[in-house]
Image: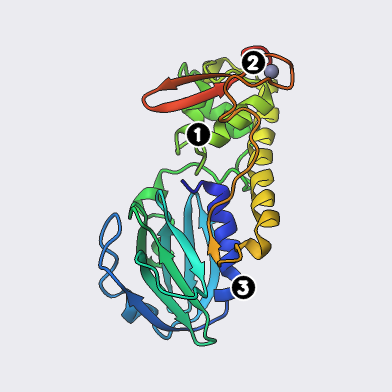
Amino acid sequence: MPELPEVETTVRGLRPVLEGERIARVTLHRPDLRRPMPVDLGQRLTGARVTRLGRRAKYGLIDTDRGDTLIFHLGMSGRWRVDPAERLAHDHLVLETEAGRVLALNDPRRFGSVDLMPSDAVAGWAPFAAMGPEPLGPDFDAAHLARTFEGRLAPVKALLLDQRTVAGLGNIYVCEALHMAGIAPARAGGRIARGRLEPLAAAIRAVLESAIEAGGSTLRDYARPDGELGYFSKQWRVYGCEGQACGCGATIRRRTEAGRSTFWCPTCQR
Ligand code: ZN
């Protein structure tokens, strides 16, 4: 499943193909993904110039000079294919630029989504309205974590996965960041000493930045040779490492609750 770093590298991969370019043709090969795509998508995008690409949590944002923003989510299996050699069965949306570049949104399981709305309404869009700050943005820091965690007895892991605390963090990155910060996933958020929150905020930024860097360096210009954007593998500190030795020498453990696994070291995470 694409996480925040994959969405970020996807946006970076799309930027040189789309930014400043005019969209010449829009083709929908089916009307819906997880939910219907806007019926007027082609009408509103055709002839529009892309002014900016960005990201909010795990959503990619494509702004046009008509004051619209296309918002895409990759769901479980979505990816953009750049200048594909052939059309594949699950290329549901295809954009062609005036310069002749082709972008196909491929999503076999169709858990992804495509929405289009006025750019000035994006911040108030329901999925974004209650979301916490971007983990790589200026509003995310130890002070924010201290305010959010104050008095909370829920496990810190659950609090970090709550999108109202911080936007776009998934299970892998929360496990990795808690290990880097030496904090036990089950520790109550409100019972973490204030002095440990700065290293935690720094660890969250570090694991995300390291993944983005790995994605960018292992994928030439963020695209695989076959032009697919969106997925890369990385060596994790604890995630998927159950039974292996932690750097401290102890054995990494795994616990599953509600279908979601937690990986942690019982010795160096307290
Ligand atoms: Zn350890």
Residue beneath the point at 57% across and 79% down: 20
| Nearer to us in this view, 60 or 255 | 255
Kindly check if marks 3 and 2 are in contact, taking CB atoms under 8 A apart as contact: no
Q: Where on the image, by quarter, is ligand 1?
A: top right
Residue identifier under label 1: 171
Residue beneath the point at 64% across and 45% down: 211
Disc 1 under 8 Å from ligand 1? The reply is: no
Residue 150 picture location, percent across and down: 53, 22
- 130 left or right, relative to 205: left
Label 3 secondary element: helix
The 10 Å Cα crowd at callout 2, few under 14, some 14 to 19, many 20 or more, is some
Label 1 secondary element: helix
Relative height, residue 142 to residue 93 (above, below): above
| Nearer to us in this view, 207 or 190 | 207
- 13 left or right, relative to 129: right
Residue 199 picture location, percent across and down: 70, 29
- 259 left or right, relative to 238: left
Residue identifier under label 2: 251
Foreground mark, 1 or 2, reads 2
Quadrant of residue 39 in the image?
A: bottom left
Residue identifier under label 3: 16
Report whether residue 256 is seen.
yes
Label 2 secondary element: loop
Between disc 3 and disc 2, whose residue precedes? 3
| Nearer to us in this view, 62 or 253 | 253
Callout 1, which amino acid? Asn
Give the position of the C terminus as an image quadrant.
top right
Callout 2, which amino acid? Thr
Quadrant of residue 15 in the image?
A: bottom right
Kindly check if marks 1 and 2 are in contact, taking CB atoms under 8 A apart as contact: no
